[in-house]
Amino acid sequence: MRPLLSLSIACCLPLLISTGAFAEERSITLGELPLLFADDGGIATKSGVTRTIHPAKQSSSPVLQADKPWEGDRVYIHGSVYPDDATGGYRMWYLTRQEAIPDIKNIAVPGFRRNRYDVTLYATSRDGLTWEKPSLGLHAFAGSKENNIVFDLHSPSVLLDQHETDPAKRWKMLGYFGGDYYAAVSPDGLKWKSHPDKKPIFPEGDNISLAQDPITGEYLAYHRLHATLRGTSRRTVWLSRSKDFATWSKAELTFAPDEIDDAWVTEPKQRTEVNNMSVLTHAAGYLGFPTIFRVTAPDRKNLSPEGKPIPFPKGQSPTDGYIDVQLITSADGLHWQRTEPRIAIIARGKPGTFDAGTILGVSSTAVHVGDETWMYYTGLTTSHGGALPEKRNSIGRAVWRRHGFASLDAGEQTGTVQTIPLRHASPHLIINASTSNDGLVRIAVLEKHGAPIPGLSLDESNELRADATQWKASWKSGTAIPTDRPVRILVELKNARLYSLYAQAATEP
């Protein structure tokens, strides 16, 4: 596992006004969507703690790679992974680009869009590591439907829409084709239909990732467009919104590299770009996973031995450089702030590994399994513009402790973290924390304006003195957390790390 890096946090923001009463604050609902601590979005006050950003532990070999005739020489996970409630396993939507397959014009899927022959594929797994490519019988390739082909978009980002009332549209997809972005819907994630019709939802771009506001159900499309920054055109991330998945707002620039990102540049036309960005939600906001592209050799020319320009081989990019993944945060999904230091939360692998050169993209979803959180990513053996056939694209798995992208840590001196007002969906508060040496975690519940609640004080709290991703808070008094009004959670830490809070459904054990 790569080492963890820590960052000292500045003094907590003051919450008390001069009279001693709490200033008015927003309140949020705490349910099964956890409150995470990569930023202070859910925090009212804190003291004696530091924030640590935790890089993933990455698979040493690919979990899925191209081995079927219709996959050519590459697979990508711009797509999504979901648990499969029916089987207890997992479902993956991923991508191949078939343009380099010999005779592709004659054997491509009939009726599919044919610019670069992008094809959306489907896989299943029992354990998240070994993936099967089922024969679906949906679309013909080279005259046979014995394949796992489901649709025809690049960067297919799939959403299981919990707000949708029409069963035929329960699954949503956004993707790219030939200069424009398109949408599709499905009742089961396998049989897809363009939506609306086959018209583009908005123009221009390349990569796209779909997210959804968990409260309003609004759809959020994070897509790539170029913008001129500091005199240079570069890849950046833009946001379009929709309430109905058919009409989309005008794109707004949402995340771009800043001057610090360009500090490494030593030659003209070198620059930092953002290749794409996946976004996850939590109780107080959003986490972004931008792929940071350090363009070392832009706009290269492929020359013959005589020095004449010739086209690059299909599948090789004229723009070269290295990409890894960082972590950013947002309260509203539009305005983002960096986590510091700007470390790679999904890093390039060691020389000779499947992900040594570039982390090209990250799945648009995370899967929480027991004590772990998984995300899937595209690893390249070479840099972005590496030579073929040395360059191979395959899919790896990144693993964190459950909800473990960041933590708030206290040492020998006791630290405290107090949340903003939370309306609990259930009285079962689940704590994700770890302790070491003589460490402990204690919990108190306060009224919205800070008054103690009898029976729910720190002194009456049962203590956590272990490592637990799903510890249920309780008090010696037996008092339950109120669910009829917003309350604050006060966490006391000593030699401990706090990762997340959430309210477990009352029906769970």
Image (cartoon, rainbow, N blue to C red):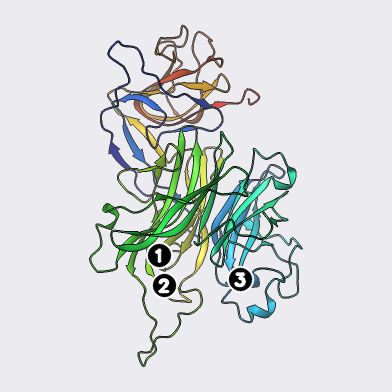
Mark 2 vs 3, N-terminal side? 3
Q: Are marks 1 and 2 in contact (CB under 8 Å)?
A: yes
Whether residue 348 is visible here, answered yes or no, is no
For mark 3, what is the residue? 117
Q: Which type of secondary structure does the marked residue at label 2 adopt? A: loop
What amino acid is labelled 1 in the image? Gly
Name the residue that disc number 1 marks.
357
What is the crowding at mark 1: few (fewer than 14 residues within 10 Å), some, or many (at least 20)? Answer: many
Residue 114's disc number: none
Q: Position of residue 146 (x, y in %)?
A: 74, 67
Identified at 53% across, 10% down, the residue is 479
Please tell me which residue is depicted at 37% across the width and 63% down the height of the picture: 322
Q: Residue 288, relative to residue 323: is it above or below?
A: above
Residue to which mark 2 is pinned:
386
Residue 233: tell me if it is visible.
Answer: yes
Give the residue type at disc 3. Answer: Tyr
Q: Residue at x 44, y 39 (%)?
A: 404
Q: CA distance from mark 1 to mark 3?
A: 25 Å
Quadrant containing the C terminus is top right
Q: Amino acid at mark 2?
A: Gly
Alpha-carbon distance for marks 2 and 3?
21 Å
Q: Earlier in the sequence, mark 1 or mark 3?
A: 3
Task: Say left or right for 257 vs 141.
Answer: left
Contact between labelled residues 3 and 1, with CB atoms less than 8 Å apart: no
